Amino acid sequence: MSDELVVTEPEGTIVVPAATLAGLVARAVELVDGARVRRPRRSVDVEVAGGSATVTLELAVRYGAVLPEVATEVQERVARVVEKMCGVEVSRVDVTIEELVER
């Protein structure tokens, strides 16, 4: 299960719920041609500890796509989006390709 992100600033506290983090990751994956999160509510896990995040996700990838290329692009895109939008360093993005789909 994903962790919520809590950012404490002198002005107050910002909380990003786990479901919001999972949705952010799922949308980042959709930006990669031929990839989608397999089951968005169950296939994304974001763990936040010590100012760093680890993302684990399961993908469905279009049949015919070059799997290592798609997986690498997903890793890079997810890390960029989470770092930019949440201000937290992403230490790793673990990807499992669980399904091939026709599109």
Image (cartoon, grey):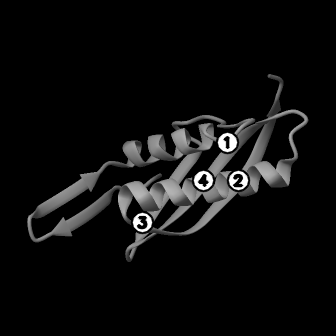
**Are dots 2 and 4 in contact, CB under 8 Å?**
yes
Task: Say which label, 2 or 3, has the lower sequence index.
Answer: 3
- Single out the mark in the foreground, 3 or 1: 1
Disc 1: CA contacts within 10 A as few (<14), some (14-19) or many (>=20) = some
Which residue is under mark 3? 48
Which residue is under mark 1? 32
**Are dots 4 and 1 in contact, CB under 8 Å?**
yes
- Single out the mark in the foreground, 3 or 4: 4
Task: Say which label, 3 or 4, has the lower sequence index.
Answer: 3
Work out how far the residue at label 2 is from the one at label 3, CA to CA, in angstroms.
22 Å
**Are dots 2 and 1 in contact, CB under 8 Å?**
yes
Q: Amino acid at mark 1?
A: Val
Work out how far the residue at label 2 is from the one at label 4, CA to CA, in angstroms.
6 Å
Which residue is under mark 2? 73
Is 29 placed above or below 53 here? above
Residue nearest the viewer, comparing 6 with 10: 10
Q: Position of residue 84 (x, y in %)?
A: 42, 59
Q: Amino acid at mark 3?
A: Val
Judge whether residue 58 can be spotted in this image: yes
Helix, strand or loop under label 2: helix
Residue nearest the viewer, comparing 52 with 3: 52
